[in-house]
Image (cartoon, grey):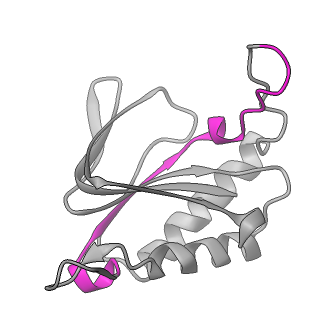
Amino acid sequence: MKFVIQRVSHASVTVEGQTIGKIGKGFLVLIGVSGDDTRKIADKMVKKLLGLRIFEDENGKTNLDLAAVGGELLLISQFTLYADCKKGNRPSFIHAGAPDMANGLYEYIITKCREQVPVVEKGEFGADMKVELLNDGPFTIVLDSAEL
């Protein structure tokens, strides 16, 4: 499982011209699910995500987590995080999870985050989405379950 976490001042996601998710200060998280991922892995990733201390405290140090700043989440599924570009110029996505399994884990992650974060917005699994954000910093972190 891979999370690309961007600290944002605001972010939104649009499908077919309609905004379906919008947040203020918080994290925009692109979520990639592989064929080997499980709920146990998702739990570990959510715990790490919600514990990240990448907001500035009163001294300008990145020392505060999402809860400490009243941050919000926008969670977007993105199978392209599992693109394999080793051969040729056209990426292969054979390592991405099958749609039904990946969507199930994506929805599970949303549910787990909503247990701890008051505002959790989401994209639409499998849709052609337009994502807008103002990256604050810029500050972007990649979490890979293979490295945790």
Count of numbered marks = 0
Q: Is residue 15 left or right of residue 3?
A: left
Task: Where is residue 131? Give x, y as percent.
Answer: 35, 36
The residue positioned 74% from the left and 22% from the top of the image is 91
At a point 21% along the width and 63% down the height, the residue shown is 25
Instruction: Left or right? Give the position of 29 relative to 44.
Output: left
On the picture, is 126 further left or further right than 58?
right
**Relative to 34, residue 37 above or below:** below
Residue located 43% across and 45% down the image:
123
Q: Residue at x 27, y 31 (%)?
A: 18
Q: Which residues are magenta?
A: 65-88
Residue 1 or residue 111, whichever sits in front = 1
Measuring from the top left, give residue 98's x and y in whole percent.
79, 42
Is residue 80 found inside the magenta-colored segment of the image? yes
- Image quarter (top left, top right, bottom left or bottom right) of the C terminus: bottom right
As drawn, the residue found furthest toward the top would be 89
Magenta stretch contains residue 6: no
In this picture, is 42 found above or below 80? below
Q: Is residue 11 left or right of 97 when viewed as pictured?
A: left
Residue 144, placed above or below residue 14 = below
Q: Is residue 136 above or below residue 131?
A: below
Provide residue 132's location: percent of width, then percent of height.
29, 37
Nearer to me, 42 or 122: 42
Q: Where's residue 144, x and y in %?
A: 67, 60
Q: Quadrant of the N terminus?
A: bottom right
> Image quadrant of residue 9?
bottom left
